[in-house]
Structure formats: C-alpha cells, structure tokens
Image: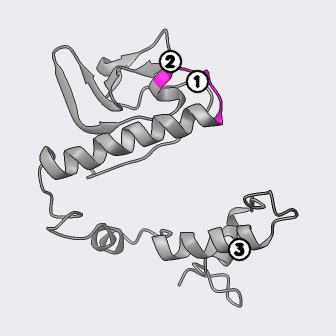
Amino acid sequence: MMSASLALVSVGYRGLALEGTERWFAEREGRYNHNAGKVEDPVGGLGGVYVSGWVKRGPNGIIGSNISDARETVKTVVHDLQHVAPKSTYGGVDGSLSDLFQEREVKWVDWRAYRRLEEKEHGNRRHDSQPREKITSISEMLLAGGVINEATGKFE
C-alpha cells in the first residue's frame, strides 16, 4: 500500500487489484466493489480510494460510459473532501500537493500546462466539428504544455 492523499491509476483493459486492495476487488468481474465510485465492502470502506471506468464497472461500455462513471466518481471525491476525508499535510487547505511533489522531486503537469496542451490540440483540429487533434506523443504533449524546455528538452 502506498501513502498518498489521492492517486489516480489507469489500469488498462481488464481491471487488476492494486497491492493491498485485494479485499475490495471482485476478481471474477475485474472490478472493485464501490458505492458511487468510492471503494468499499459490507464490512467497511477503504478510505480515500476511488475508481472509474472499467475498474469500476468491469470491461464493458464505451467512452461515454467512462465519462459518466468519472462524473459520478468526481462528485463522490468532492463530497468526501468537503464532508468526510481527513485533512492531510499535503493538499486541501492544509498544504499543497505540489509541495509533496517538490519534496520528492516528482515532475508533473499542472492545470495551466494541461490547458496549454488542450489549446494546442484544439488549434490542431482538421475540421470545425472535431473537438481536438489528440497529441499522442508524451514528449510532444510536454512541449505543448510548456512543461519541458524546447531547446534543452528538460523539465522546467
């Protein structure tokens, strides 16, 4: 089990239990037992663990299903942050996740960089009806977001 205020993990096609969370995982269905995206079982919840997409409902559905799953889970996360979740030294009103990342020398993409990437993808559209032209190269994403310096190729 890792100690974190919030971790979002993309699992892939068939859901797999993260180490230390096997008790809440429905192996046969390839998904976690949850209530509106918050992982729990009849005995009690696993505080601060949330799921979306296939690891929430099993390997089925379409992109639209993932969007509605994510919306439901985000509502649960926001509710818990406002009413349930304990405060930590990082994140929320008591601190900053960026402080933790800096302390651990983690490189990350912040919201402003994400918005720059989104604008670049929107500007690359081939048709007005297309929402964006997705950039699929990680290095190109980081360049478009202004996270790495184009001249040096290093994180800023």
What residue sits 52% from the left and 33% below the top?
A: 53
Residue 71 in magenta stretch: no
Instruction: Give 108 or 129, whichever is nearer the viewer.
Output: 129
Q: Amino acid at mark 1?
A: Arg
Magenta residues span 57-63
Asked if residue 19 is positioned above or below residue 139 in the image, the reply reads: above
Q: Could you classify mark 1 by the number of other residues whose Cα lies within 10 Å: few (under 14), some (14-19), or many (20 or more)?
A: some
Q: Could you classify mark 2 by the number of other residues whose Cα lies within 10 Å: few (under 14), some (14-19), or many (20 or more)?
A: some
What residue sits 56% from the left and 72% below the top?
A: 115
Q: CA distance from mark 1 to mark 3?
A: 32 Å
Outermost residue toward the bottom in this view: 151
The chosen color scheme is one colour
Q: CA distance from mark 2 to mark 3?
A: 36 Å
CB within 8 Å, label 1 to label 2? yes
Please indicate whether residue 116 sits to the left or right of residue 121 in the image: left
In which quadrant of the rendered view does residue 66 lie? top right
Q: Number of numbered discs present?
A: 3
Q: Which residue is mark 1?
A: 14
Q: Amino acid at mark 3?
A: Lys
Q: Quadrant of the N terminus?
A: top left
Q: Which residue is mark 2?
A: 30
Tag in front: 2 or 3? 3
Q: Amino acid at mark 2?
A: Gly
Q: Earlier in the sequence, mark 2 or mark 3?
A: 2
The image position of residue 80, as x and y in percent, is 21, 44
Outermost residue toward the right in this view: 126
Please indicate whether residue 140 sits to the left or right of residue 146 in the image: right
Q: Which residue is mark 3?
A: 120
Q: Which element carries disc 3, helix, strand or loop?
A: helix
Q: Which element carries disc 2, helix, strand or loop?
A: loop
Q: CA distance from mark 1 to mark 2?
A: 6 Å
The image position of residue 83, as x and y in percent, is 13, 47
